[in-house]
Image: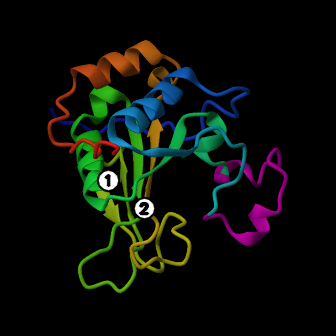
Amino acid sequence: MSSKKRPYTGTTDGVATAKRKGLERFAKFFCDEYGFTNWGTLSVRIMKSAPADIQRLPIDNPKARPWLSVHATGRAVDLHHPNRKIIVAVCDFLVANADQLGIEEIHDYNYKADGSEFAWGRGWRCSRNAWKIYDAKANAGTPGGTKQTSKWIHVELSPEFADDPKKILDALTAADKTVIPKKKPKK
């Protein structure tokens, strides 16, 4: 499978009033099948990378609107996993199947560029169909850079997939997941 450039919807659908069933099903799939922990979906807030003066504004302030987190739309999930190899494999899988899964954005907060002391992360977006490697000056809110400790990814779904648990589960079931190692069985 491959993906092509598509428009990024961001927060155009506004603040959600409830969790979106497709996104919740997506998160459950990765928790059940690969041992991820769901660190959160719906959270009406400003992006953590917003300037401090914006962070203090109420969510309904027009100046805050461009800084609204996609978590506020109910279409973003943060998934944690202790195994970096599984995180990388899942990121590769999501990018390879982005069109089929309605993936709009991925942040890999634990990514460390070659030659960098800190892991400033990387971000993939459907509108560029490519990864952007972050550094100390330009990053997606990685808290101060890390030395390989922030082991989570942020994934955003399109409105269509975020609202349809059957559609997302059918797409996940149909996709070739052999690139993702299974979680270790519990003893």
Question: In this view of the protein, which residue sits in the foreground, 150 or 140?
Answer: 150
Query: Residue shown at 46%/17% (left/top)?
Result: 165
In the foreground, 45 or 181 = 181
Please tell me which residue is depicted at 48% across the width and 46% down the height of the picture: 37
Q: Residue at x 76, y 62 (%)?
A: 55
Quadrant showing the C terminus: top left
Task: Give the amino acid at mark 1.
Answer: Ile
Which quarter of the rendering shows the N terminus?
top left
What residue would you read off at disc 2? 151
Queried whether the magenta region covers residue 54, the answer comes back as yes
Image height of 58 relative to 96, above or below: below
Which class describes the residues within 10 Å of circle 1: few (<14), some (14-19), or many (20+)? many
Q: Secondary structure at mark 2?
A: loop
Q: Which residue is mark 1?
A: 87
Tell me, yes or no, whether the two marked residues, 1 and 2, touch with CB atoms within 8 Å. yes
> In x, y percent, where is residue 146?
46, 77
Q: Vertically, is 86 above or below 30?
A: below
Asked whether, in this view, residue 159 is left or right of residue 43, the answer is: left
* Cα gap from disc 1 to disc 2, whole angstroms: 8 Å
Q: Give percent across and percent down for residue 106.
A: 40, 49
What segment is highlighted magenta in the picture? 49-67
Q: Nearer the viewer, residue 151 or 17?
A: 151
* Residue 101 visible to an observer of this rendering: yes
**Please, what is the three-letter code of the amino acid marked with disc 2?**
Lys
Q: Is residue 7 visible?
A: no
Mark toward the start of the polypeptide (1 vs 2): 1
Please provide percent x and percent y for residue 159.
51, 26
On screen, residue 151 above or below 26: below
